[in-house]
Amino acid sequence: MKKISCLNKTKKYSLVGGASLIMAAALLLLARKVPVFAQWYSENVYEVLVTAVGGLFGIFPFSLSEVLLYVLIISASLLLARLVIRLVRGKAGKAEIARLGAGVFCMAGVLIFIYAASCGVNYHKTSFAASIGLKADNYTAAQLAEVCLVLTESVNSDAETVARNQDGVMVVTCNVAENARAEMINLSEDFSCLEGYYPKPKGLIFPWILSVQKITGIYSPFTIEANYNTGMTDYNIPFTACHELSHLRGFMREEEANFIAWLACSESDNPEFRYSGGLRGWISCMNVLYRTDYEAWAQLRVKLNPLVEADLAANREYWAQYEGKIAETAEKVNDGYLKANGQSDGIKSYGRMCDLIVAWMQENR
């Protein structure tokens, strides 16, 4: 009877896993081939998921996705150890091994379907730029330099208003979760495509898991949570919280999430959010200016407030300690993931935020 039970479970696991993969493939294929479907799905089905699942898991004050990840790792390790012991003792039969394999296949299939339903389809919806009628056309080096000058002056001013520790490095004193949510809601009043339910973003309990991959934040499609790295230099935190909430709103392209976060922070009455968004925007645009017109970059670079230099130095020092194979591998995986989801620039797409900022400032000054 036990053998029959194992076979029945193996068959059920296999069927559920296979069905989940088929549904995931159908969703992603339909979204890729029929953009209208992706937009409809995002506005109707995904919106319900955000409100229901995001609202439910938003009750937890900690990142549920982080805790579930640790539970999964520990559970998988215990199951594997148990199987190895039974194999060594000659107590594990083929049926048990097959059942375990089918269970893994089932879980993988279900997770892939959840990913497709709460993340993958959104890669093919109408872009934020198209939604608001923003055209990121080509611009001259002079126009870029002009934008960088405005950003430099803004960052220099806001750098004087934020709290700092004894080393002169900015420290976040506000409630990031409450403020990030409020900033995104405020921004949605100007852009209807950002309207909807926003759960609070959550800082990780053990940020090492992101830091070792050199990641500032992550959107969890399995729990519909916006998570940010609590260990990184503080000036990154408000911006990152808004960035991940932008993903939760269905805008998955990295340059657009960056741009939305920049807009949310730039319009904020909170100096910590303004400084965070301003500095991240300044870095993006100055990096492009460096490659485009080095002389213009050099003239602006020396004008940066020494207080900002302290933050940049602390940021470099923080990430330097995580240089290594794990970070390199994580970067390659992220690059491949983005390209597989239609972002041909891969991780370079993060820097395309500059194009959108320049276009926005050209149209709104």
Image: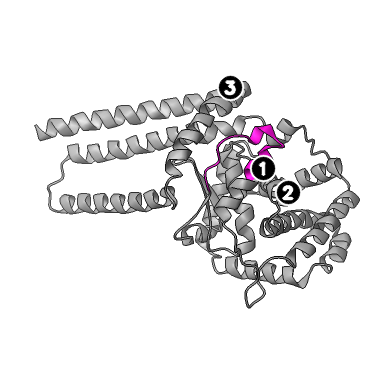
Q: Earlier in the sequence, mark 2 or mark 1?
A: 1
- In which quadrant of the rendered view does residue 151 lie? bottom right
Is 9 drawn above or below residue 208 in the view shown?
above
Whether residue 175 sits left or right of residue 13 in the image: it is: right
Query: The residue under label 1 is which amino acid type?
Result: Asn
Residue lying furthest left: 1
In screen coordinates, is 191 left or right of 221?
Answer: right
- Secondary structure, mark 3, is helix
**Closer to the camera in the image, 294 or 274:** 274
Q: Residue at x 57, y 63 (%)?
A: 232
The residue singled out by tag 1 in the image is 186
Gap between marks 3 and 1, in whole Å? 28 Å
Q: Quadrant of the C terminus?
A: top right
* Of the pair 130 and 79, the residue shown nearer to us: 130
Q: Whole-percent x and y of residue 161?
A: 72, 65
Given contact means CB atoms under 8 Å apart, are the residues at marks 2 and 1 in contact? yes
Q: Nearer the viewer, mark 2 or mark 3?
A: 2
Q: Which residue is mark 2?
A: 267
Q: Mark on residue 37?
A: 3
Q: Mark 1: which secondary structure?
A: helix
Q: Amino acid at mark 2?
A: Glu
Q: Is residue 110 magenta?
A: no
Magenta range: 184-200
Q: Nearer the viewer, mark 3 or mark 1?
A: 1
Quadrant position of residue 214: bottom right
At which x and y percent is residue 126?
66, 30
Of pointers 2 and 3, the one earlier in the residue sequence: 3
Q: Kindly give the residue lying farthest to the bottom in the view shown.
A: 166
Identify the residue at image location x=25%, y=40%: 100
- Residue 216 visible, this orientation: no
Choose the circle earlier in sequence order: 3 or 1. 3
Badge 2 marks a residue whose secondary structure is: loop
